Amino acid sequence: MDTPVVLGIVSYAVFPARMGGQKCVQGFYEQLAKETKLILAVAKNNQTDTLPGAQVENFLFDHWKGPLNIIYLFRLIKLIRKYQVNTIIIEHSYFGWLGLLLRWFTGKPFVIRSHNIEAHRFRDMQRLFWQTYHSYEKYVHRKADHNFFITEEDLNYAITNWQLKPEKCTVITYGVKPEAGIDTSKPVLRRRILEYFKIPTNSLLFLFNGTLNYTPNTDALHIIVYELLPRLREKKISFTIFICGSDLSEQWEQVLKEQPEIIYGGFVDDINVFMIGTDCSINPVTLGGGIKTKLVEALACHQTVITTTTGVKGLLPTLTGDKVKVIPDYDWTVFANAMSNLNPYHQSMTPDAFFEHHNWKNIIAKALVSLRSL
């Protein structure tokens, strides 16, 4: 079977990956580069020496300046002809219009790889143009030769509301690296965290992490401080909540510093240290779509997760066993009860089926079936 030649188009800074969405792009293309001949056209603000096996061309404007990439249309056409590209993959729907033009000039099919329903994300962020973007998003997904969605929920939404044909849609989820699932030395890291931060040994240790200027995560901070903390304090238990992530506002940083049970860690280079060393990841989000990448990463570290119904979307309950405790949205009393009742010393391991499903190698094998059919 001939090796497919793929042109991937990435409209924003991804390399090196720091946040969940960036890791989703990098992990996908790292594995795809092992299975195909891969050419990547990326935004010029990428550091492109971190993707072995791919021919990386960093000349595009990022997504806010996306329309300016019309000046690079013939440069992209030249790349397609030079490398005899079979298929074009557009990350997100932002550059779907560019995929349409490239197909018109070259005859090559294009795929949109969606990370969520973007218009719904813009709606949650209270962007005024979200309805206009929804119409555009629907249009380009309908025009694409194939569509990759990151969750079953997003795929079903697109089929039902955008009238996409089921045979033109595939769920291509978020993956973890093959080394995930190895013995984690949890007691050692837990003890180090307790000692470093001078926390009593009988404390429950919780983690919330994410990009902290993203509306669903900022809303979750409000819930942690004003809904969960008062309820947990009433229970007279010893606990600490670590909050890690980038782009926290000065106002929120001051609020967090005023809470004695919260330790704000900022951006952490190796978040796995906290995912392994704390007792539980919490995800009190009620906004946002797609899959919550931080939950996949937590489960890959055998971390127990307490989340809302909204927060668990995209995760298959048949793969997570008893590692995920799902609380109805807005029921913060039950959420706090689940936190206070956690037993850190009697926790199971994440099931093997989870690692099979979220292994990048298996994900790419599924994607290639769709790519080869175009």
Image (cartoon, rainbow, N blue to C red):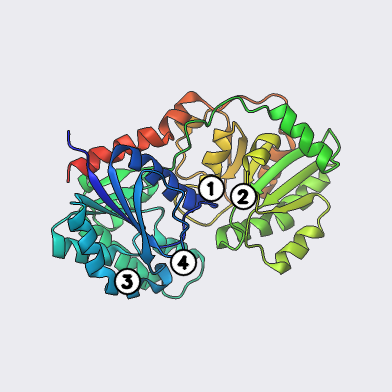
Residue 357 visible to an observer of this rendering:
yes
- Residue at 53% in and 32% down: 180
Q: Residue 260: horizontal and vertical position, in percent?
A: 84, 52
> Which residue is label 4 attached to?
123
**Which residue is nearer to you in this view: 142 or 249?**
249
Q: Are marks 1 and 3 in contact (CB under 8 Å)?
A: no
For label 3, the residue is 69
Q: Please give the label number shown on residue 311.
A: 1
What amino acid does circle 3 point to? Answer: Asn
Q: Looking at the image, do the residues carrying marks 2 and 1 touch, with CB atoms under 8 Å apart?
A: yes
The Cα–Cα distance between marks 2 and 4, rounded to whole angstroms, is: 19 Å
Residue depicted at x 47% and y 72%: 127
Which residue is pictured at 20% across the width and 53% down the height? 145
Q: Residue at x 65, y 54 (%)?
A: 267
**Sequence-earlier tag: 1 or 3:** 3
Q: CA distance from mark 1 to mark 3?
A: 35 Å
Q: Is residue 66 above or below residue 268?
A: below
Q: Secondary structure at mark 4?
A: helix
Location of residue 34 in the rendering, given as x and y in whole percent from the top left corner: 34, 38
User: In the displayed structure, does residue 26 sit left or right of residue 102?
Assistant: right
Q: Is label 2 in a helix, a strand or a loop? A: loop
Label whose residue precedes the other's in the sequence (2 or 4): 4
User: Of circles 3 and 2, which is in front?
Assistant: 3
**For marks 4 and 3 on the same chain, the one whose residue lies earlier in the sequence:** 3
**At label 4, which amino acid type do we have?**
Arg
What secondary structure is marked by label 1?
loop
